[in-house]
Image (spheres, coloured by chain):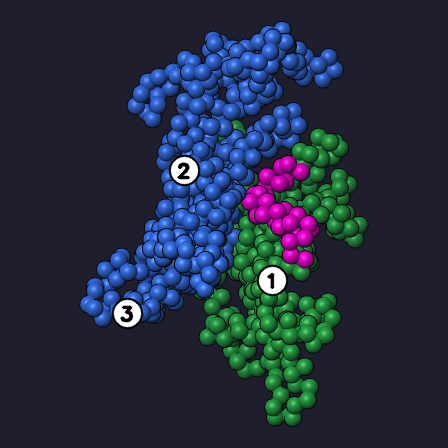
Chain colours: A blue, B green
């Protein structure tokens, strides 16, 4: 506490001679609400702050990918199979260009391997245009439009900022499209696990006794099983003809069936330690009902911890979905997720030919690290009164 | 836990005033603990068989329908009489609880069913792969421990040194990187730069050969890659735990006292803080094995190791349910038993664990 105080005010100790001269600063700390203190504490974790910006951008991209992506993720053109990424060019012999442009490609065949090769053709320039009309889509299933954030003048030629895949589909568009399922499945899965975890962990911690022992045994049992083989087995039973949304929820449920145990442990631990706290006893003696004690007195004091644990649980959900889809037992094409895209990278030759197929992996790592940092920051901020 | 400075403290004291730590004798209490843990294993194993049986039953239609469909798809004539005979043999015409009992008794007799994909009894397929899986997982644990311990101690003792920063950063990245991505990137890099195909666990000439010393040695030379890939996350975790625990201990007054008494730094660190810090370190081992087996499944698919992963995946894809279920069952059972053994060893080492579970 002293340290916090020192960091926030520049004052080190209450008996500091300058102490009386800045009463407003001191008062600021004393009268700050817990929420304010938490924010101050969280703000000090630079990486967490930065990571929350990254996460916000990621989720915004997931919400609006149809607009951000230059092309329909399923639009293919075999002529540009494995076309390499085109660099945005800002300068040419005439000087600065804005908006930037890309050079075209000359494609030919390698005389020895007959493999298609692409060569940058500096004589052809395609200027990038913003707010262009391109492939039509239905925004959030409501609005029929063909507006894209950027693209080329004519929708006939294509620009591949992150290269193209085996069928000449734009990797950037596919990546943006895949983000929706990948990042949302983490959230939905965690919410589902949270409901299960709070319900079961709460019962276990609040009532104790036989219920507690039984629930703890079940949790131990689930955690002792190797999870990926179990997930694989369960998701192998999802019928192949199911529509995408149903598969999505089935996968989420399968992941949550195991994921709730960690959260249930956290909730139980909190309940157990709070049950005997003075303020809970006081509320009980004052005649508050059990429901009121749980909702009004106990929940606020562990909510921040729960939020921190929830944040730390999201990346493992994202990773699990990615692994399942990567192995071919999770989301299936035409649905797109990072795991589905990474399946293309299973073929070593393809990766050597087109290393940009690994970009979904980069996004996975960024998302996972960002969630971990934010979770760490939240965990520190969860208890602003601790040192 | 040993009382710190037990020896120093006791040096000049009369016998009745000496402080003694717990000794490593197997007491009645210890035996009771072991028996209790083994008894608890029984319901767990029972649950595992039920879950596994559910997995067999989950796909729509019974298992022979899938087989018949496969045969028909392959253009083979479907022999109805043979199907009926098989249905009888596996008890598929009976209700579910009876099927479960029959399946269970068959397994207890060592009969795991028949793999239609491979056309051999399941037990001919699983054992070698299971053994390899556990061999790799246990080696990984050992690797994780040694590396994690050494780096953790180094990082704590040399806090905020360049080495500490490097290891801490590497550790953080290691925690965030999924195993299979590391595998993909390493394989791509090796192939792209050196033309090396880093897959499999054996050289070409030993792949189908029977086990021999030469084959074993060949495997050891291929083992490093799966070890590193599987061990990254675990090692990172260990470094973090060890570093944090040891730092806590190093700041305690007794360390300062020992230093003041003139104990050499190396001896001091090794004798007291490291031992105390090691305690939470070892107690995580219980969760390591399930995680490793889990992670190994997917890494072995990427690296095409001849372990359970690829075959389990293949069996699930083709709905070869007896094979898949046998893998699931044996992986779970062996994991649970392995965890139990590590728990028991821990309890022998650390009396607090015995107390906790009472």
Q: Can residue B152 be seen in the rendering of this structure?
A: no
Q: Which residue matches tag 2?
A: A184
Q: Nearer the viewer, residue A17 or A97?
A: A17
Q: Look at 66% across and 85% down and name the residue there.
A: B10
Q: Is residue B182 magenta?
A: yes
Name the chain letter of the residue that bears numbered label 1. Answer: B
> Between marks 3 and 1, how big is the CA–CA gap?
37 Å
Mark 2 packing: few (<14 Cα in 10 Å), some, or many (20+)?
some
Q: Are marks 3 and 1 in contact (CB under 8 Å)?
A: no
| Region in magenta | B158-186
> In the picture shown, does residue A220 fall above or below B10?
above
Mark 3 packing: few (<14 Cα in 10 Å), some, or many (20+)?
some
Answer with mark 2 or mark 3, whichever residue precedes in sequence: 2
Q: Which residue matches tag 3?
A: A281
> Between marks 2 and 3, how big is the CA–CA gap?
40 Å
Q: Are marks 2 and 1 in contact (CB under 8 Å)?
A: no
Are labels 2 and 1 on one chain? no
Q: Nearer the viewer, residue B36 or A378?
A: A378
Q: Which residue matches tag 1?
A: B247
């Amino acid at each position: 506490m002293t340290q916090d105080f020192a960091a926030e005010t520049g004052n080190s100790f209450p008996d500091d001679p300058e102490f009386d001269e800045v009463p407003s600063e001191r008062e600021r700390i004393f009268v700050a609400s817990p929420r304010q203190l938490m924010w101050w504490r969280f703000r000090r974790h630079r990486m967490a702050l930065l990571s929350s910006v990254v996460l916000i951008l990621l989720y915004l991209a997931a919400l609006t990918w149809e607009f951000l992506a230059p092309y329909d993720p399923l639009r293919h053109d075999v002529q540009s199979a494995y076309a390499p990424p085109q660099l945005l060019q800002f300068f040419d012999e005439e000087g600065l260009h804005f908006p930037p442009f890309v050079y075209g490609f000359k494609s030919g065949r390698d005389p020895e391997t007959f493999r298609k090769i692409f060569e940058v053709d500096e004589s052809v320039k395609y200027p990038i245009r913003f707010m262009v009309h391109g492939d039509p889509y239905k925004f959030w299933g409501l609005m029929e439009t063909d507006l894209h954030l950027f693209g080329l003048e004519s929708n006939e030629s294509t620009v591949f900022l992150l290269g193209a895949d085996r069928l000449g589909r734009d990797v950037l568009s596919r990546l943006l499209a895949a983000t929706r399922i990948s990042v949302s499945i983490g959230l939905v899965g965690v919410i589902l696990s949270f409901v299960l975890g709070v319900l079961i962990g709460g019962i276990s911690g609040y009532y104790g006794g036989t219920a507690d022992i039984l629930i703890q045994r079940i949790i131990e049992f689930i955690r002792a099983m190797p999870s990926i083989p179990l997930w694989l087995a369960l998701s192998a039973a999802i019928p192949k003809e199911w529509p995408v949304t149903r598969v999505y929820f089935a996968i989420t449920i399968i992941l949550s069936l195991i994921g709730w145990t960690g959260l249930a442990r956290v909730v139980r631990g909190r309940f157990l330690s709070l049950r005997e706290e003075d303020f809970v006893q006081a509320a009980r003696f004052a005649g508050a009902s059990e429901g009121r004690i749980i909702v009004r007195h106990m929940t606020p004091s562990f909510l921040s911890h729960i939020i921190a644990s929830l944040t730390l649980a999201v990346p493992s959900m994202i990773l699990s979905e990615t692994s399942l889809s990567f192995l071919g037992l999770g989301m299936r094409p035409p649905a797109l997720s990072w795991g589905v895209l990474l399946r293309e990278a299973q073929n070593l030759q393809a990766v050597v030919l087109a290393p940009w197929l690994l970009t979904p992996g980069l996004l996975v790592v960024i998302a996972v690290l960002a969630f971990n940092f934010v979770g760490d920051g939240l965990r520190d901020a969860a208890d602003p009164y601790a040192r | 836990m040993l009382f710190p400075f037990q020896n120093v403290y006791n040096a000049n004291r009369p016998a009745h005033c000496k402080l003694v730590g717990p000794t490593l004798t197997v007491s009645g209490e210890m035996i009771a603990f072991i028996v209790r843990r083994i008894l608890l294993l029984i319901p767990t194993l029972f649950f595992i068989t039920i879950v596994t049986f559910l997995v067999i039953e989950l796909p729509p239609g019974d298992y022979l329908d899938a087989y018949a469909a496969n045969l028909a798809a392959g253009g083979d004539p479907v022999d109805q009489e043979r199907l009926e005979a098989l249905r009888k043999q596996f008890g598929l015409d009976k209700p579910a609880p009876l099927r479960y009992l029959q399946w269970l008794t068959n397994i207890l007799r060592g009969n795991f069913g028949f793999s239609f994909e491979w056309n051999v009894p399941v037990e001919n397929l699983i054992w070698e792969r299971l053994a390899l899986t556990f061999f790799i997982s246990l080696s990984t644990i050992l690797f994780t421990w040694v590396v994690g311990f050494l780096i953790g101690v180094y990082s704590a003792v040399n806090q905020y040194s360049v080495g500490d920063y490097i290891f801490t950063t590497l550790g953080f990245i290691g925690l965030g990187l999924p195993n299979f991505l590391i595998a993909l990137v390493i394989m791509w890099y090796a192939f792209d730069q050196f033309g090396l195909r880093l897959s499999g666990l054996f050289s070409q000439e030993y792949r189908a050969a029977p086990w021999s010393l030469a084959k074993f040695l060949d495997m050891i030379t291929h083992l490093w890659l799966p070890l590193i890939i599987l061990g990254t996350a675990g090692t990172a975790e260990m470094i973090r735990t060890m570093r944090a625990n040891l730092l806590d201990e190093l700041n305690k007054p007794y360390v300062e006292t020992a230093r003041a008494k003139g104990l050499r730094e190396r001896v001091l660190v090794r004798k007291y803080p490291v031992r105390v810090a090691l305690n939470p370190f070892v107690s995580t081992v219980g969760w390591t094995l399930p995680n490793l087996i889990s992670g190994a499944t997917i890494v072995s698919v990427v690296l095409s190791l001849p372990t359970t992963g690829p075959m389990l995946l293949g069996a699930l894809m083709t709905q070869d349910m007896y094979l898949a279920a046998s893998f699931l069952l044996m992986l779970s059972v062996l994991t649970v038993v392995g965890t139990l053994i590590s728990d028991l060893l821990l309890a022998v080492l650390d009396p607090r664990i015995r107390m906790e579970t009472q």
